[in-house]
Image (cartoon, rainbow, N blue to C red):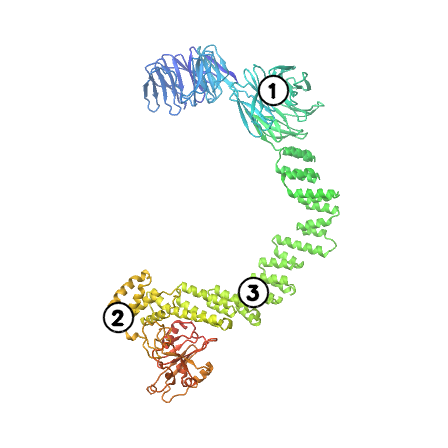
Amino acid sequence: MRAVLTWRDKAEHCINDIAFKPDGTQLILAAGSRLLVYDTSDGTLLQPLKGHKDTVYCVAYAKDGKRFASGSADKSVIIWTSKLEGILKYTHNDAIQCVSYNPITHQLASCSSSDFGLWSPEQKSVSKHKSSSKIICCREERNDILAVADWGQKVSFYQLSGKQIGKDRALNFDPCCISYFTKGEYILLGGSDKQVSLFTKDGVRLGTVGEQNSWVWTCQAKPDSNYVVVGCQDGTISFYQLIFSTVHGLYKDRYAYRDSMTDVIVQHLITEQKVRIKCKELVKKIAIYRNRLAIQLPEKILIYELYSEDLSDMHYRVKEKIIKKFECNLLVVCANHIILCQEKRLQCLSFSGVKEREWQMESLIRYIKVIGGPPGREGLLVGLKNGQILKIFVDNLFAIVLLKQATAVRCLDMSASRKKLAVVDENDTCLVYDIDTKELLFQEPNANSVAWNTQCEDMLCFSGGGYLNIKASTFPVHRQKLQGFVVGYNGSKIFCLHVFSISAVEVPQSAPMYQYLDRKLFKEAYQIACLGVTDTDWRELAMEALEGLDFETAKKAFIRVQDLRYLELISSIEERKKRGETNNDLFLADVFSYQGKFHEAAKLYKRSGHENLALEMYTDLCMFEYAKDFLGSGDPKETKMLITKQADWARNIKEPKAAVEMYISAGEHVKAIEICGDHGWVDMLIDIARKLDKAEREPLLLCATYLKKLDSPGYAAETYLKMGDLKSLVQLHVETQRWDEAFALGEKHPEFKDDIYMPYAQWLAENDRFEEAQKAFHKAGRQREAVQVLEQLTNNAVAESRFNDAAYYYWMLSMQCLDIAQDPAQKDTMLGKFYHFQRLAELYHGYHAIHRHTEDPFSVHRPETLFNISRFLLHSLPKDTPSGISKVKILFTLAKQSKALGAYRLARHAYDKLRGLYIPARFQKSIELGTLTIRAKPFHDSEELVPLCYRCSTNNPLLNNLGNVCINCRQPFIFSASSYDVLHLVEFYLEEGITDEEAISLIDLEVLRPKRDDRQLEIANNSSQILRLVETKDSIGDEDPFTAKLSFEQGGSEFVPVVVSRLVLRSMSRRDVLIKRWPPPLRWQYFRSLLPDASITMCPSCFQMFHSEDYELLVLQHGCCPYCRRCKDDPGP
């Protein structure tokens, strides 16, 4: 640090206080009873201000620069504008000691010996407050540390909380003024020692700013600058500029520099690591070398060493201390010595401070640098002002003159091999010499510093004029912009010092590398590239070396860019060379083909006698026009191969039609068919299929497959027929659901029956045509699947409360079981299932009406029908009630209808039964009400409702414990499938030995009795068998052989069936007999009507009996039988 006096002036009176305008352009001084205003740029007195009557003690400028204030011994404070006009004056009770502005609110604090006041520009009034002691100072500071200097000749530091920081620092003089400098980094102190000193913020004295002739009464730093103004007791005003020099040292990638004047920071330029060494004294010089660091302080030199030999270690420790004051211009440290430079003299001292040797130069020493060497024998490179350049070894008293030039040396550096020397002279010229021959190799202008690359012998860089210049060997200079001085060059990193900081700049070495490539110096170019180039540069180097057949260099470069493709090429060439191949043209042709220089490669292949390689190359590249030039003497295989590859190429470049034509001409029909199929070209596929021979099954099959996919089943069928593949044809019809063609083919070829009907049934089932599916399964002989479909349909109908459908499906299921029962092995099992399913069908058919009555708001059934159905279900239900059937609904319906029809006893019985069951909430109220109201009815049933047995004429109870049979004769009742009335039919059985055919023939031989007229009429049609018996009065008393058979002994417990002989059969009228013609293995059932005037109809499909009028009405309503859903137009069985 050094202070330069900018200007000086002298006033007539003591300078009591100083204040700068915030922008630094004006300086206000309190001198005597006046204020002096100076221009800070040149020290011109702008204007003296008069307003006080006594000595002005203090002055302060507001931070906004609009006004300043002064306080005087005349007890007054004056507010001045920046235009030097007084605008306000107010007084205190005593002399004003100090004034200060708030930087935020711009309030003014003015302090006297006994009070202080606060003035605000907005309020214009002054509020004053008494003080118990004398106020001598007030100041606004933005620092967190309070510095206090007192006449005990010490300076102390405190936190704002009042806690002292560190120890008191002795001053050895009486301080009169103290102020912070450059944002609190330093402190200015002046007083009785007649000078202003610069201290660190910790109180370490750094140096003198300026010596004066009298006590320094005040000092201030110009805002945001390195200027200081000093005011003395004798009226002297001095304006200084403080200049801080850079103290630093560099060795390879370690840079040490001074920070805050008392600290040393060592920075690793590669890893960016930093370490701070606190010296607590002014650092005057720094030197660094390998693992050594030397720091010169005012009274000593400290020698540091690294803890370890690790190149990245940044931990230093003190090795030696030389307690002695030295004066030197330059400081250099070696492994065991320090070198002091004093003008023309060099001194070598050991770490213990002993001077070992001294060198006296002819001229001033301008530059000194350690160039390495064994410990204790290091070499120094020294440049003198007279142009001499010397090499000195620390263990040798004699200096070696390397060369002498005419101009003074500014900077110099020696190459890594110590064969070349670069010098920058005072004319900013960079000169490069050969040390052995002393020959000037080249020179470059506009240089201020120079450095050799430590990793490459032939590369150096120099800076100057705002540019960085890189020179390799004797090639032209490569230039780029760079601010600062070059101080080091290591690999691709250039260390540049700009202002007070050093930075590592990554510089690609592309330009010098290309300069070597231009001269085919591949190995040298590789060395340059290793210093740092881009991937593109590496690839260019690899390609150039490969073309130059320098495979070793090319291999290294391709490894850098990780190009496996070219590495495989180089590896194959090296293998071939090991096997004895020496044809460089062939090697170069391979290289050209890899690089895309195909025509050059083809020429080299032809020149080396390998035309087949050129043909293969052009074919692989789909350059077929060029490939034809290298075809042999019309070899068909080669021609076919070429056409095939050309077709492949056309296919890949989205020219499929051309590819198809080429494939067909090359005989590659499969590939042609694949392209046509992928693009949906049906016409071309048909054309190919028709031209192919039927023996070529693979392409024909592929054609058919694509035609099927392209929704052309007719053409696919044509192809299958051409091949004779009937099975595939069947599959085609099935997959396309062309069932008529499939059935026709099945008729001609029964072996495909399963392949047709099974998928047909599945298709029907998938389309919710389950009944047709069941029939198809049955027709296909898949009884198991047919039964499964029906069972699933039945379960679904029950689960969805579609009981009418459930009855129908159970009937179908029973008929399916009957059909299967024709197999003797399954007869017993299937017949059991037949009867079970028949029973379930009857139950669900009846329960459908009960469910509709209880669930729907409107019922279509008459009360008598619901009454009969309820009784029928109660008599027929097994112990385990079938799924979906509710006893509650049956009993509830029975109770309601019984009450409505006058069967009160039965109704009461039904309500009593309901009490023992779980009643749903929606029926609870109705049942409870019915249970109460039925008690008011008589305890008997209407006789009109009592069922009659037509065999024994016995009246049966409404609730029969035996079920649906007569309590007297045990004859089962025959019910109408619509109204569930007991029909006037009696089942009879044939005598043993009478077959069904004989029985029919005997019945058909009816002999007309004389007293019966011809009013009997049988109406038969395809849909039903209707018996209408109309008897006259004359026929009532006739004897009937069948009637005689109906006699029954009263009170028997066993059922005795009616068995008829041939005579009885012959006496029967065909019109009185109804026959259920069951298919085998069941026998037919015969029924005789006992009331000829009541017409009964039997469905020829399900054999259910109906009153003829009811049946006709239901068929008209539904278009089919209400039980088996046989349409009226369907033919009978």
| Mark 3: few/some/many CA within 10 Å (<14, 14-19, 20+) | many
Sequence-first tag of 1 and 3: 1
- Amino acid type at mark 1: Val
Residue 69 appearing in the image: no
**Helix, strand or loop status at disc 2:** loop
| Circle 1 residue | 332
Q: Amino acid at mark 2?
A: Phe
Which residue is nearer to you in this view: 1133 or 617? Answer: 1133
Q: Around disc 2, counting alpha carbons within 10 Å, would you say few (fewer than 14), some (14 to 19), or many (20 or more)?
A: few
Tell me the quarter of the picture where residue 753 sits: bottom right
In the depicted structure, whether residue 483 falls above or below residue 826: above
Q: What's the residue at 41%, 73% (across, down)?
A: 1121
Measured as percent of width and height from the top left, residue 388 is found at 66, 18
Residue 486 x, y percent position in the rendering: 60, 26
Q: Which residue is mark 2?
A: 939
Quadrant of the image occupied by residue 898? bottom left
Q: Nearer the viewer, mark 3 or mark 2?
A: 2
Q: Which residue is mark 3?
A: 732
Quadrant for residue 989, please give it. bottom left
In the picture, the disc for residue 848 is none
- On screen, 1132 above or below 552? below
Say whether marks 3 and 2 touch (CB < 8 Å): no
Dot 3: what SS?
helix
